[in-house]
Amino acid sequence: MTYPESMVCLLNLLRLFRFLNAVALALLFLASRFHFAQVGIEARDYLIAFIWLLLAGFAYAINDYYDIAIDKVNNPARPIPSGEISPAVALTTILGSAALVLLLTYIVQPVPIWPIVVLLMALAYSSIVRRVSALASNILAGVLVACVPLSAVDFSLSVSVLLFSIGSGLLIVARELQKDVLDSRGDTGHRPLALLIGKHSVFVSASYPVILAASFVLIYLSLNGGSNLYVVSILGPLYLGMLVHFGFAKSTVAKNQVRLAKIICYLLVPLLMLGTI
C-alpha cells in the first residue's frame, strides 16, 4: 500500500469512528471532571478521556457495521457501504478498539467497571435494541451520553452532576427522535418505525417540547456562576430553534434539528469550563 493509499485508508477509518464526535465526548469528560469534581486534571483523567474516545468510536463504528444494508439507502457515502472500507477491515478495527478499551481499563487504577458496561451497552444498542424498540434505542443513546459526566465523578450522584447528566441525556433523546425520522426510508423492514411518525406519533410529538424544555432547565440548574448567562444567551436560542423547527414538516426539517442538537452538545464543553470561572 502506497503512502497516499495509507492516508486515504486512515481518513476513512477516522470517518468510520466519527473522530470529531468521539473527541467531543472525551472533552466532555475532561470538562465535567474539571467542573463537577473541582479537581485538577491528572494523567489518569487523560487516560480515561482516551478510553471515552475509543468507546465513542467503537459505538459509532459497530453501529455502521450492523447497518450496512440500511446505510446503502440512508448514507451510501459512509465508508463501508461505499466500499472504501471492507466489512472485514471494519470489523477487525472495531474489535481492536474494544480490546484496547479493555487493556486501558485494566491499566487504570483503581480499575473502573463502567467502561466494560458502556462497551456492552453500545454493542447491545446496535445488535439488538435498535431492531426491537425505537423507544428503548432512543433512551439507551441518551443513557450512554449521560454516563460521560457521571463517570467524571466516579458515579457519585451529587445533585448538580445528576441534573446535568439527565439534561444532556434528554437532549440526545430528542436528537435521536429526529434522526430516526431522517433514517426512516432505509430503516423500513429492518427497524421499528420512528416514534415521531409511528402509531404513537401524536403523543410523542406532544412530549417532544417537554423533553427539550426539561433538558434546558436541568442543564441550567446544574451549573453555577457566569455559565447561567451563557446557557440563556447561547443555548437558549438553539433550543428555541429546535422547538420552532419542530412545528414544520419533519421530513425536511429533521436534519436541521439534528444539527442544532449537535451544536448544543459541542457547546456543553465550554459551558462547563465557564461555570467554574
Image (tube, rainbow, N blue to C red):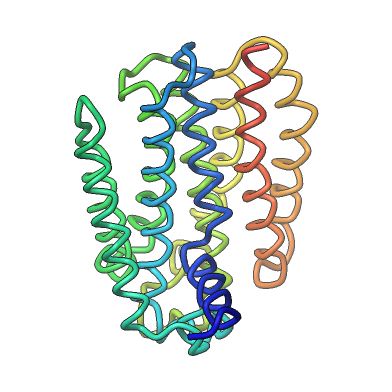
User: Dividing the image into 4 quarters, which one contains the C terminus?
Assistant: top right
Q: Is residue 254 above or below residue 166?
A: below
Q: How many marks?
A: 0
Q: Quick one: 255 or 273, which is closer to the camera?
A: 273
Q: Residue at x 44, y 48 (%)?
A: 53
Relative side of 103 to 12, left or right: left
Residue 180 at x, y = what percent?
Answer: 50, 67
Residue 158 at x, y = what percent?
Answer: 38, 14
Q: Looking at the rendering, which quadrant does residue 254 occupy?
A: bottom right
Residue 246 at x, y = what percent?
Answer: 69, 55
Q: Quick one: 181 or 197, which is closer to the camera?
A: 181
Q: Residue at x 35, y 67 (%)?
A: 62
Q: Residue at x 48, y 70 (%)?
A: 13
Q: Quick one: 75 or 170, which is closer to the camera?
A: 75
Residue 259 at least partly seen: yes
Residue 168 at x, y = what percent?
Answer: 51, 37
Q: Looking at the rendering, which quadrant does residue 144 occupy?
A: top left
Relative side of 172 to 148, left or right: right
Residue 207 at least partly seen: no
Q: What is the residue that sits farthest to the front in this orientation?
A: 2
Q: Residue at x 64, y 17 (%)?
A: 275
